[in-house]
Amino acid sequence: MPLIIALFFSCLMMACNAPVNIKTVAPSNNSSIIRSSYPEGMPPVYDRFEDLAYIFQQQSDTTYVINFWATWCKPCIEELPYFESLTKQYSDQKVKVILVNLDFENQLTTKLLSFVKENHLQSSVVVLLDPDSNDWMNKVNSQWSGAIPITIIYKQQQRAFYEASFDTFEELEEKLQPFL
């Protein structure tokens, strides 16, 4: 709970961003995706980070762009169109954009689902509800303070971590270029 509060206030102080299309990311075999209690069109919902951790461990020739965001985070929402542009512009290349949503569970059907539908998001969207953020944040990146948005770009062993919002599409694309 302290991390959620810290995320909320750090996001408000920094200013958070957002677009999304619902394409699922293949879950692990032991996944604890919650599906039955959510309406059609809801992105995959994970209640444990361990079930989502595989997205940080891919060893292929694909470049992964993973962004942690929430609908209540203004800077997150402001930068999401840039991630959508990446998805569209690099659709013919091995680039996969994954938007990891951190909304509160009680807002998934009221805020997140309508946001995803209204913005016709094309990037892969997943929801992470794991409350033990003090444990899994270090697995994402040991330098992560808990603020969002954050973005990880990686391809095999090459990785970059950004704990800030992107001000332009060009800025985000410039960070992607060394991975292509």
Image (cartoon, rainbow, N blue to C red):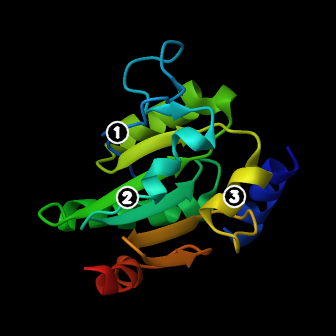
Amino acid type, mark 3: Met
Label whose residue precedes the other's in the sequence (3 or 2): 2
Amino acid type, mark 2: Gln
Q: Is residue 16 visible?
A: no
Amino acid type, mark 1: Ala
Using the numbered discs, state the Cα–Cα distance from disc 3 to disc 2 in whole angstroms. Answer: 18 Å
As rendered, which of 78 and 130 lies closer to the eye?
130
Q: Name the residue under label 1.
A: 26
Q: In this view, does 101 lie above or below 168?
A: above
Residue at the extreme top of the image, as rendered: 36
User: How many discs mark residues in the rendered view?
Assistant: 3
Q: Mark 2 points at which residue?
A: 58
**Quadrant where the C terminus is found in the figure:** bottom left
As rendered, which of 70 and 177 lies closer to the eye?
177
Q: In x, y percent, where is residue 19?
A: 40, 52
Secondary structure of the residue carrying tag 2 is loop
Q: In x, y percent, where is residue 43?
A: 43, 33
